Amino acid sequence: RGAAMATAAAAKKAFADLTKKMLTTPRWTLADYKTQLSETMKSQDWKIKYIPGVSSSPDTKRFKDEVKVLDALQEDELEDRSIIKTLRLMRISKQTDKSGRFIRDVLERFDQLCLMQRWLKSEESEGRPIPESYEEAQDRMSHDPDAQHYAQGSRAMETYRR
């Protein structure tokens, strides 16, 4: 039980750090996402090294694979996600040995973080409390018509990017 509480506290702190970065960053970029994922991996390093099975867990593998994809991005791609289209996806796929679907999934997770950043900035500007966990943010966003509007715009942009 103590380990579960420590894990929950660590997740809460990680989310607080993420929201602070999102609220102080003008525009969330893939470079920011890459930094966030790398910091998450570093904070989990001790678990990966010392807890049996963690290094081979699906979550650890996914994190490593996502970082591998982000490491393959060029500087202009890290700053402007919209330029990553078919030819660039093919280059990234070949360079990382990851499928186009996996790379698009990484980009979709990034798009969702951009959506969350816009929503958090809106919440802050309206004087509403900032959520304390990712789950709380997801729940509140799912009931917020403005966030749903952002999501529709995000899906429209994703369709356009393909």
Image (cartoon, rainbow, N blue to C red):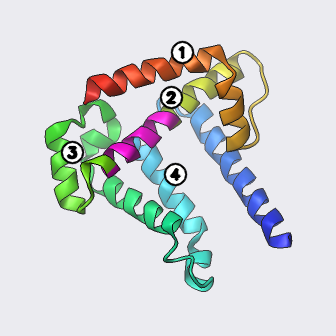
User: The N terminus is located in which quarter?
Assistant: bottom right
Residue located beneath label 2 in the image: 26
Q: Nearer the viewer, residue 144 or 119?
A: 144
Work out whether mark 4 precedes mark 1 in sequence or the reverse, and give the earlier one: 4
Say what amino acid the circle numbered 3 marks.
Answer: Leu
Q: Is residue 30 magenta?
A: no
**Residue 62 locus on image (x, y percent):** 44, 61
Mark 1 nearby-residue class (10 Å; few <14, some 14–19, many ≥20): few
* Quarter residue 66 falls in: bottom left
Question: Label for residue 149?
Answer: 1
Left or right of residue 56, residue 135 in this image:
right
Work out whether mark 2 precedes mark 1 in sequence or the reverse, and give the earlier one: 2
Left or right of residue 152, residue 97 in this image:
left
Work out whether mark 4 precedes mark 2 in sequence or the reverse, and give the earlier one: 2
Q: Say which of marks 4 and 1 sits in front.
A: 1
Say what amino acid the circle numbered 1 marks.
Answer: His
Question: Label for residue 36?
Answer: 4
Magenta residues, start to end: 102-112
Mark 3 nearby-residue class (10 Å; few <14, some 14–19, many ≥20): some
Say what amino acid the circle numbered 4 marks.
Answer: Gln
Q: CA distance from mark 3 to mark 1?
A: 28 Å
Q: Is residue 105 magenta?
A: yes
Q: CA distance from mark 4 to mark 3?
A: 22 Å
Residue located beneath label 3 in the image: 89
